Amino acid sequence: MSRDFVIALFYYIDEFCIKFEPMFNKILLPNRRKTRMSLSELMTIVVLFHLSKFRTFKDFYISGILQGNAPGVLKGDFRYLSYTRFVSLMPRTVFPLFCYLSSLLKPSTGLSFIDSTILTVCHIRRASSHKTFKEIASKSKTSTGWFFGLKLHLVINEHGQLQAFQLTSGSTHDLIPVESLTKKLVGYLFGDKAYLSKNLFQKLYQHGLKLITKIRSNMKNVLMDPWEKLMLRARGVIESVNDRLKNGVSNRASSPSITKKFFCQFIRRFGCISTIA
């Protein structure tokens, strides 16, 4: 993480906040307490944390930001706030970061990959006593076994850049969110066997999107264009995005004590992935 990268990151977030804040302030309560640190500074710091190698945010903020020990950060780059005050302000960054993430989603390039990954919130044996995500998490089964948690559905282009995403309960079938995720896409969409559906293929084909998947072992072989077969093998790029995202999010119930904290952390990490993509 170089000095130039930190400056560029703050520049892009600050440019977004210049346009976003006037509209955002209209819906805020008039007596909301003001803070010394700007919204763009708050957002930049929480994104930088997920790019750093610090294990805890407290160490990152005190040592990395206030003392200037984080890579690419100098002492005095950000206006001073105590750690306790900064933590109390972090929830303010969730909605702006979500909007910033939405602004970073890439338009259709004619070539897209779709996949889903699980976010386990606790061991399957403790599902009945789990309370943190009781209302939204659910049991489901994948090729690796049973789990209790959520599902993250992603659509990326050939460069690994995010085009759409959706978070659902673990029991949601992979086919259900496909239409809403791909409504702005055209061209080719590559997925695994979980997206194999004749009805879905026809619906997507009507608005200019061709769904290409592998066939199951008990199905008749179908002739496929060599280029389409080659691109189907390149689906591994979306697995890399999934791995990078999941490894940065503390998705165990022991880390976030409340549901709100989990989604705050999730959106921050997602914004980080989109920024550097």
Image (cartoon, rainbow, N blue to C red):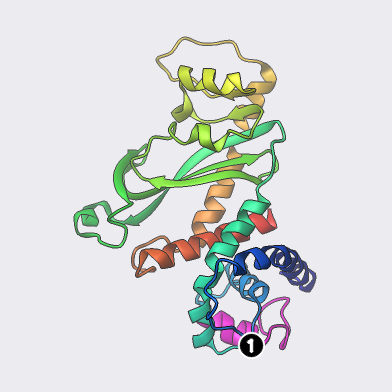
Q: In which quarter of the image is residue 79?
A: bottom right
Q: In which quarter of the image is residue 237?
A: top right
x%, y% of residue 155?
A: 58, 40
x%, y% of residue 49?
A: 59, 72
Question: As drawn, is 250 to the left or to the right of 160?
Answer: left
Viewer-nearest residue: 42 or 129: 42
Residue shown at the point (69%, 76%) measured from the top left: 71
Which residue is at the far right? 4
Check the image and report above or below for 20 versus 235. Answer: below
Tag 1: amino acid: Leu
Crowding at dot 1, Cα within 10 Å, few <14 / some 14-19 / many 20+, comes out as many
x%, y% of residue 167?
A: 45, 48
Which residue is at the far left? 128
Viewer-nearest residue: 14 or 167: 14
Is residue 69 one of those drawn in magenta?
A: yes
Residue shown at the point (46%, 9%) measured from the top left: 220
Residue shown at the point (75%, 65%) measured from the top left: 15
Viewer-nearest residue: 226 or 169: 169
Badge 1 is on which residue?
66
The N terminus - image quarter: bottom right
Dot 1: element: helix
First to last magenta residue range: 58-79
Residue shown at the point (53%, 81%) measured from the top left: 31
Viewer-nearest residue: 83 or 21: 21
Check the image and report above or below for 177 versus 149. Answer: above
Question: As drawn, is 34 to the left or to the right of 159?
Answer: left
x%, y% of residue 188?
A: 64, 26
